[in-house]
Amino acid sequence: MPYALPVKRIVLVYGLCGGVVIAALKVAEYRFVVVEHSVEIYGGVIAFVFAAVGIRLGMMLSRTRPAAVSDVVALPAPLAPSGEARASQLGLTPRELEILQQIATGKSTREIAEALFVSENTVKTHASRLFDKLQVRRRTQAVHVGRKLGLIA
């Protein structure tokens, strides 16, 4: 039994030395691979980074956002029953009434033009004639008078 301890120590030392040698060979092999194939490794890393950035940007840009208040389409208010008689008395055309209804929803000239499929100049012309017939100068006054006369609800 006195020889058991030195044998274990020798096996342990040889095992540790073998492990160090194997680790050194693996490091040398790794260095050889990195040096030999550095262009491919760098190219792969750059490709991975660009792919990750592209995916992230794509997800950010294609994210749906909730509709803003201006994106919601407002239906024009229906004409009050007594409003038809008033409109004919004032000499308002159906298009002018339509413009008045669109103004009452708070739309801009451009938005009204897009909704009615006409040019902005056409909307301005109809609005100007409408203001003359209602004897007002501003959009807010036109809406107020239109509601008072029952032209819009």
Image (cartoon, helix red, strand yellow):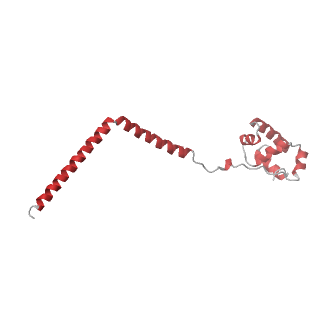
Nearer the observer, 23 or 152: 23
- Residue 25 occupies quadrant: top left
Q: Residue at x 37, y 38 (%)?
A: 41
- Determine whether, in the image, residue 68 is placed left or right of residue 47: right
Q: Is residue 9 above or below residue 121?
A: below
The percent coordinates of residue 17 (x first, y second) are 18, 50
Q: Residue furthest bottom?
A: 1
Q: How many marks?
A: 0
71 or 100, nearer to the observer = 71
Residue 43: quadrant of the picture: top left
Residue occupying the point 90% across, 45% down: 88
Estimate the x, y position of residue 3 in percent, counting from the top left.
Answer: 9, 61
Going by the image, does 150 lie left or right of 29? right
Q: How far across and how far down the image is residue 14, in percent?
A: 17, 52
- What's the residue at 54%, 46% (across, down)? 60
Image quadrant where one finds the N terminus:
bottom left
Instruction: Please tell me whether residue 144 is drawn above or below residue 29 in the rendered image.
Output: below
- Residue at 38%, 36% (x, y): give it: 40
39 vs 13, left or right, is: right
Which residue is nearer to you in this view: 116 or 47? 47
Q: Nearer the viewer, residue 149 or 120?
A: 120
Q: Give the left or right position of residue 25, taking residue 145 as reference.
A: left
- Outermost residue toward the left in this view: 2
